[in-house]
Image (spheres, rainbow, N blue to C red):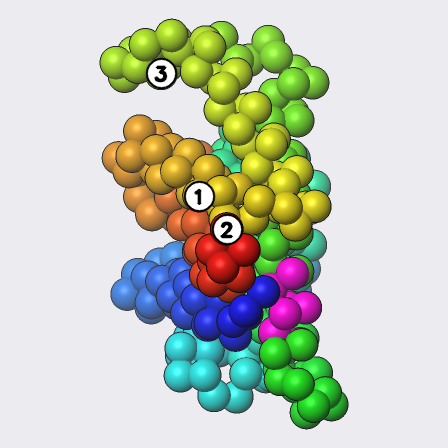
Amino acid sequence: MQHPARGLAVIRVAVALLLLSHAVHALLHPEEIRGLGDLLSARHLPMGHGLAWSVVILQTLCSLALLAGRFMLPACLGHLLVLAVGIGLVHAPRWYVVGGASEPGHPGAEYSALLMACLLALLWAQVRRPQIGDGEIPSHQGLDLVRIAAAAVIAAHPLHGFAYPEGLPAFGQFLQGLGYPFGHQLVWLILLIQTACSLALLARRFVVPACLGHSFILAMGIQTVHAPHWFVVGPGENGMEFSLLLIACFISVLLAHWPREAKGR
């Protein structure tokens, strides 16, 4: 890995923009903050509406700090706190997959979990930097965390498809309805590519083609499935932000590995 720091820079900007979009949207639509306050009050948290405003303001400040590359430690910790509490209050009782795949209307925790992995990678690189003479070592380790987390998140989807194939014909028919030939066979091809690319990333082998394979499938998924919907994932909105975060993860890993692998060839 030649330049892991530039890969982490991609993660930093992507995470900041994705989280900032929620805070800005909430500030522009205060009724959503009131809804969050009602949810917090229903979970027996004191001063639910005031707490909701505090969360939105905290997310805004932490995202702006990440974009500027300043106050990285408190910015990462602030976002991690909000995401962890969100998983405990909203996502944890439900199935892992976002978008309400298992129970309609209830988003799973995988998007928040991947965001937390990215933030932990940034936090690790920030905390460890003063303790190690070579500044690339903590960035290297942080980007490894991003690589493993993104690969594991993607791998859960084809493995679920292999374990429960009864839902695959419907997906194949959906693809054929969009004009793709051999829809059922195409679904199996997608699952096989996702599995192979995830295993390659977990083993840290063929990293560049694995990242390209995942990014291509995710980009096609955005075009065919997510683009007509609002940006935000779940509940039931099927937006594209989770796919964009995954693409950012794979681009960051690809950028860090490309020079070395090209030189090896």
Cα gap from disc 2 to disc 1, whole angstroms: 17 Å
Instruction: Tell me the CA gap for discs 3 and 1.
Output: 22 Å
Amino acid found under the numbered disc labelled 3: Leu
Q: Can you say which quadrant of the picture contains the N terminus? A: bottom right
Q: Is residue 165 above or below residue 236?
A: above
Q: Residue at x 63, y 70 (%)?
A: 140
Element type at mark 2: loop
Q: Quarter of the image holding residue 151?
A: top right
> Which amino acid type is marked by label 2?
Arg
Tag 3's secondary structure? helix
Gap in Å between the C-alphas at discs 2 and 3?
37 Å
Q: Position of residue 90 (x, y in %)?
A: 61, 49
Q: Which residue is mark 1?
A: 212
Above or below: residue 97 compared with residue 165: below
Residue 229, percent from left and from top: 30, 38
Q: Residue at x 40, y 77 (%)?
A: 67
Q: Residue at x 62, y 84 (%)?
A: 135
